[in-house]
Amino acid sequence: MRVDLFDFHLPQDRIALRPALPRDSARLLVVPADGSFQDRIVRDLPDCLRPGDALVVNDSRVIHARLSGRRLRGELTANVEATLIERLDSSRWRALMRPAKKLAIGDRISFMGHGGAIDARVEAKGEDGEITLAFELYGPALDEAIELSGVMPLPPYIAGKRSADARDETDYQTIFAREAGAVAAPTAGLHFTPQLLAAIEARGVRLYRVTLHVGAGTFLPVKAEDTDLHRMHEEFARLDAETAQALNGVRAGGGRIVAVGTTALRVLESAADDAGRILPYADRTSIFITPGYRFRAVDMLLTNFHLPRSTLFMLVAAFAGLERMKAAYAHAIESGYRFYSYGDACLLQRCET
């Protein structure tokens, strides 16, 4: 499909720079299959669910993936910044570096922060500023040093307007976060509070956890003119056997599977077979969902409002219909909904094709 089909105009003042407080006071646009829209708030979510439904959340935890340092090459030095995007092994990371043009294979980089210096060597260079860094530390010692020296990697549309601060340490982490490894938050989960979870449980809805370590590729623009030419970034995903069995039981009993966020949906669809049965999964996934995709596992999707021409808007267009989502986004813009990571949410019912 042509990528320009997924374009729309978004006024800059609709981009949220801080989340709603409390979290579950964010607005919620409900988009049922009949084409109508309902303006609600996230706190109303239990009323939109049915006893026996399953809510599936991503429990990935955002790490302090942004590091500042200096390139050391003999007596020549230069300031550089790295955003870690993928762990390769116990001591190596892929990173987006700025300015990448000042780096050469073999260069030494010393990252500085509250935890002292972390030294690394440029092992390889790729496209679009991608660098492979081999750190001198490894394993838990490297993880601890990154947490001490790095900062929260806010999305570019927020970081371009303000710096990360102490509030982001909690604001940009979901209450489900426990598996460290993401460099971006699974933002639909940011709307949840203990009070909301208690109300969902009282409704007779069970909560299940999966893991997908969100990579910085989620923010990369689609540069191709046709979706068939876009190469989707890979991310590690995990769904254990107990969760798979429970979710299959939910569907067998007539319950619906409600994915909290596009990341949870991508795990579930990666793990499902052609018959719709969810299997255990622990692997990398590069699933790219565009209109025409046949959904096998997910019945409803809670998600934030996404960027024009992004793979995430393509996914929601596949899930709920392109024209319906264009209309929903137009309604959200006109009605003052807040967009992107710290913005409001929408609850989508899957369209049947």
Image: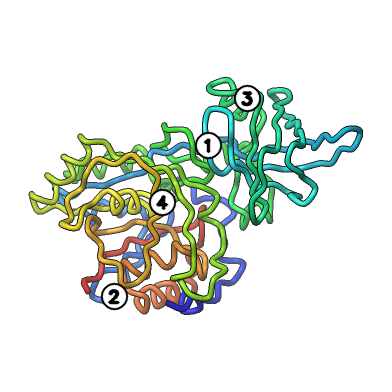
Of 312 and 272, nearer the camera is 272
Against 29, residue 286 (above or below) is: above
Q: What residue is pinned by disc 3?
A: 145
Q: Earlier in the sequence, mark 3 or mark 4?
A: 3
Using the numbered discs, state the Cα–Cα distance from disc 3 to disc 4 in whole angstroms. Answer: 29 Å
Q: Amino acid at mark 2?
A: Ser
Q: What residue is pinned by disc 1?
A: 88
Residue appearing at x 30%, y 39% in the figure: 209
Residue 206 location (% of width, % of height): 21, 41
Q: Amino acid at mark 3?
A: Ala
Determine whether the residue tagged by mark 4 lies in a helix, strand or loop: helix
Q: Which mark is residue 188?
A: 4
Q: Within 10 Å of the Cα at label 1, are there few (<14), some (14-19), or many (20+) other Cα atoms?
A: few
Against 148, residue 289 (above or below) is: below
Q: What residue is pinned by disc 2?
A: 36
> CB of mark 4 within 8 Å of CB of mark 2?
no
Residue 292 location (% of width, % of height): 31, 72
Choose mark 4 or mark 1, whichever is in front: 1
Of 187 and 119, nearer the camera is 119
